[in-house]
Amino acid sequence: MKTQEKKQKQYDDHIQKIADSFKNGDIVGVPISKVDRTNCEKKIIPCLVQERIDKDNMPMFRLRTPFGQLHTLYAAHQLVPMSGIQPSILEGITFDNTNSITLVQASKLFARGTSTATCDCKTKCHTKLCPCRRANVNCSTKCHAKLGKCSNNDTTKK
């Protein structure tokens, strides 16, 4: 029992040290679950630390994305430090807007912008009849499965 208590104390001290390194306005990342993203989308969404809340001696953080304040609080061990990185998407974020958003909604907006377009085209998405091309976003794995080479995913397209 003493060994377990000692290990728990070491873990708690480690988490406290990590939590103390995060200040208001710091940039951190929140991992996006595999089920909430496609294999070609980003795995981490950048956020700003809005405030620290100590809840039952456990430091929790309220985070802000470019699309709104995340609905849930996050513990220090759930965050990825992103010091030295300045994503352009986080520039000009203000903390006065209090609209609440879930991580899933924020990750969808982060990955595909304001467009939620997906398609089920039988062709190779050559024309603006494709909802993805019309919205000026690349087709993803959530679109037409096993179509082959889709022209809407070309890196050379304008």
Image (cartoon, grey):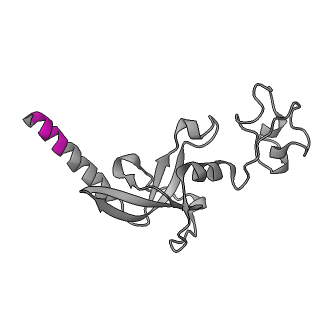
Where is residue 31 shown, x and y percent of the image? 49, 44
Where is residue 8 shown, x and y percent of the image? 18, 41
Is any part of residue 104 visible from this angle? yes
Q: Residue at x 11, y 34 (%)?
A: 3
81 in magenta: no
Where is residue 32 shown, x and y percent of the image? 52, 43
Instruction: Find the residue positioned furthest to the left.
Output: 2
Residue 64 vertical placement versus 97 (above, below): above
Q: Which residues are magenta?
A: 3-9
Q: Nearer the viewer, residue 157 or 126?
A: 126
Where is residue 59 shown, x and y percent of the image? 30, 57
Q: Nearer the viewer, residue 52 or 56?
A: 56
Instruction: Give the quarter of the image for residue 41.
Output: top right
Instruction: Give the quarter of the image for residue 1.
Output: top left
Residue 119 vertical placement versus 95 (above, below): above
Residue 95 vertical placement versus 58 (above, below): below
Instruction: Give the quarter of the image for residue 5.
Output: top left
Assign the magenta stretch its main secondary structure. Answer: helix
What is the number of callouts on the image? 0
